[in-house]
Amino acid sequence: MPSGFRDYGPRDAIARQKMIEKIRTTFERFGFDPMETPAVERTEVLTGGEATAGKIIFGVRGSEEKEEDPDGRASKSLRFDLTVPLARFLAANPDIPKPFKRYQIGNVWRGERAKAGRYREFMQADIDIVGAKSSEADAEIIAVMYEALSALGAGDMEIRLNSRETAFQMLDTRDVPRERQLKTLIEVDKREKLPKEKWWGLISDTSGMDRDTTATYITELEGECPALVEKLREAIVRCGVPESTLRYDGTTVRGLAYYTGMIFEITLRDAPEVGSVVAGGRYDGLSARFSPLDLPAVGASIGVDRLFAALEKLGKIQKKETNAQVLILNLIEGEGEYVKIAQELRSAGIATVVYLGDDRAFQAQLAYAVKKEIPYVVIYGEEEERKGVVQIKNLATREQTEVAREKIVEYFAK
């Protein structure tokens, strides 16, 4: 398997799907509607002229090699997030009623170096509100994410808030040239990844500020909450998010260039080593890349794989081998009644498996049920066939109950 990719076996996949379903339910409870976009987009759509984005995309080369540019770059690439495809979709569908509230859950790909906890293929769960520029829209995005994590039992959270507007203003007042500002903010965002002295040096070198100016800048970053962020904090609290979870952090600036206003990250206080599990912000104007439309927009993304790892560390993930609830033992060769029983149970919404292995031994089939953690087995052998009954064994309690053949569905319905 290529580096940076991984499999999910049934134990992980079942637990992961249950987690995703809780996230989906929360999104829909707030009125967000589902949408999907292709995994592959035109490279120029994804990069939008951003050099940073161009470094992390996976090019896709098909039979139409003529579509590659003279420099050998692929004309199509795998999406690296779900936001740029959304902007492209809205430009192609300008008549969609606004505000437009959508969610999308899907895989994205980044050509970064694989390392512990960082993969090249991973899943994101996004929500976005397009066509609303109020702080109430910003606050709702954060409230939805808080509710989704709460539904998963994520525990105590820290929601770090900042504003790109404020971040640029701080650099403007120190006469940092515009062409250096975004690169400076990218270095600012590395505070938790670097030793303090190296972090200071990178900010100073990238911005062109001298040591003293850099010192006052960092003091301001770590200082009191600016008025713009305080207004946002008040709106978030009105949405039901506890004030104790909110913290202004001037060093939270997010790496992608399309952010224009509010930005935030959520970490779990009981699993800080995992890093942020949710991040997002306001990205007004992204749609203008693709059409005359210049729509205000705000959104956020859950890193599904990272959140799964964090919840697993916190003991919040319950794993099991299968979704099957019943195993029908296959004790009589050629007995068509097994399939009939299975069809009856499945029609009643009970996930049922007929044992299809070659081993007809009772103990071998029972051992299979135990290994698969299937809670019930149905026993229908020659004696049960003669009496018109089935034996139902609860593998958790080891209790065995005799039930009339025609009342098997009724038994499980209870």
Image: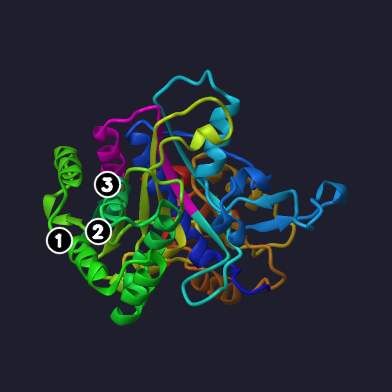
Image quarter where the C terminus lies is top left
Disc sitting over residue 223 in the figure: 1
Task: Classify 10 Å Cα crowding around label 2: few (below 14), some (14-19), many (20 and above).
Answer: many
Q: Nearer the viewer, residue 216 or 121?
A: 216
- Compare marks 2 and 3 and give the one earlier in the sequence: 3
Is residue 140 rendered magenta in the image? yes
Task: Classify 10 Å Cα crowding around label 1: few (below 14), some (14-19), many (20 and above).
Answer: few
Question: CA gap, disc 3 to disc 1?
Answer: 29 Å
Secondary structure beneath dot 2 equals loop
Which amino acid is tagged 1? Gly
Q: Which residues are magenta?
A: 124-146
400 in relation to 410, above or below? below
Q: Nearer the viewer, residue 347 or 47?
A: 47
Which quarter of the picture shows residue 346?
A: top right
Residue 132, position as x, y percentages in the image: 35, 28
Q: Are marks 2 and 1 in contact (CB under 8 Å)?
A: yes
Name the front one of labels 2 and 3: 2
Task: List the residue tagged with mark 2.
Answer: 250
Question: CA gap, disc 2 to disc 3?
Answer: 25 Å
Q: Residue at x 39, y 62 (%)?
A: 184
In the displayed structure image, the side of residue 255 where residue 6 appears, left or right: right
Which amino acid is tagged 2? Gly
Task: List the residue tagged with mark 3.
Answer: 147
In the displayed structure image, the side of residue 114 where residue 269 appears, left or right: left
Q: Residue at x 72, y 70 (%)?
A: 358
In the displayed structure image, the side of residue 218 where residue 62 appears, left or right: right
Q: Nearer the viewer, residue 353 or 282?
A: 282
Which amino acid is tagged 3? Glu
Name the front one of labels 3 and 1: 1
Res 46 visible: yes
